[in-house]
Structures are given as structure tokens and as C-alpha cells.
Amino acid sequence: MQLSARGNHVSALSSYHQAVEMDPADAMKWFRYGETLAALDRRIEALDAFDRALELDPGYVAASGNKAVALAVLGRGDEALTVIERFMKRSPERPDGHLWRGRVLDHLGEIEQAAAAYRAYTDAHPKRSEGWQGLGHALFRLQRYQEAIEAYDAALAVDPGDRQSIREHTLAGRALKKKNP
């Protein structure tokens, strides 16, 4: 069970800490522990947990991606991009690298490049809302509101209950009206 998905990260942290102590060879437990640490803004500790997950399972996509995002948030952009580039070189058939690259570039303020990475992901995975949501977010930041709305529409076509896309779609609509009254 993913305890942190319920939003109670402090309780989840304790549970995941116990889980990794009881079963230190389980990459998923280390990943969940790192994910929870990151949610609590304990990113340096999260990096250690993601590294442990990757030692146990070098192909763990989410651990690589979350490690890269944590590095980007800590201002270690070159390292973050290196993690993503290594993953993409090791697994070129997996377009997930484009999603994570978009997230890292977004954190680094490289919004045009982030949008291009999200576009590459949506081209490969048009039925996954996270790519459309990321693309919408990047386009919104670029003040390309109509395109952002279209990306959020695509996200909502895949996942009509995506609250973040609903909220950001509304914000993009307001911004577009303000820009073009």
C-alpha cells in the first residue's frame, strides 16, 4: 500500500522506515521511503533512499526520475540531467525518460526544453495524462494559454478526474481571457 498517497507523509515515513529496516533488499520500499522523504522536503535523505533503490534495481524508472527531480530542486541541475541522460541511454526504448527530463527542466527553469520533452512523451504515450498535464503546465508558464488549454483538454480526456489539470485548465482560461479580453 502506498501510504503517502493519502497525504499523511509523517505516518508514512515511520512505516516506510520500519519497512526498509525489516527488508533492506526491497527496492520498492526504498523508493517509497525516498518519495515520502521528498514530500516532506527532506531531499538529501531522499537521494540516499533513491540511490539505495537504484543499487537494488538499476532499471527502476521512478527511482531515477525522482532522484533527478530531487537533485534539480536542490539546485544540482547538471547532476539531475546526467541521471536522466544515463537512464535514457540505458533504456532508449522507454519514453518515460522524456517525462522525467521535462520535470527536471521545468524545475531548472528551462521551460521551452521542458515543453519539448513533454511533447516527446505525449507523442509516445498519448493516453497518459501526466505528459499532457506537464505539457500544459510548461505552456502555461510560457504564456501560451490556448495551447495549454488544449494540453489540459487532452489530459482530461484521458483522466476526467485529474484535479490538477482541472485547476490549471481553469487558470489558463482566465489568463487567456485577461490577455485577450
Image (cartoon, grey):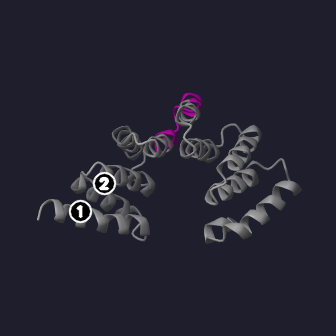
Q: Earlier in the sequence, mark 1 or mark 2?
A: 2
* Quarter of the picture holding the C terminus: bottom left
Give me the C-alpha separation between circle 1 and circle 2.
9 Å
Q: Position of residue 17 (x, y in %)?
A: 80, 59
Q: Which residue is mark 2?
A: 140
Residue depicted at x 70% and y 51%: 31
Secondary structure of the magenta portion, mostly?
helix
Query: Viewed as shown, does residue 96 lie left or right of 33?
Result: left
Disc 1, SS: helix
Residue depicted at x 26% and y 57%: 150
Q: Position of residue 168 (x, y in %)?
A: 35, 64
Q: What segment is highlighted magenta in the picture?
A: 86-99
Circle 2 Cα neighbour tier, 10 Å, few/some/many (<14 / 14–19 / ≥20): many
Residue 35 visible, this orientation: yes
Q: Which residue is mark 1?
A: 175
Residue found farthest to the left = 181
Between residue 56 and residue 93, name the one nearer to us: 56
- Residue 89 in the magenta stretch? The answer is yes
Vertical relation: 6 (above or below) 31: below
Q: Position of residue 32 (x, y in %)?
A: 70, 56
Vertical relation: 177 (above or below) 52: below
Residue 162 visible, this orientation: no
- Residue 90 in the magenta stretch? The answer is yes
The kind of residue on which mark 1 rests is Ala
Q: Position of residue 154 (x, y in %)?
A: 33, 58
Residue depicted at x 30% and y 68%: 170
Quadrant housing residue 180: bottom left
Between residue 16 and residue 48, name the one nearer to us: 48
Circle 1 Cα neighbour tier, 10 Å, few/some/many (<14 / 14–19 / ≥20): some
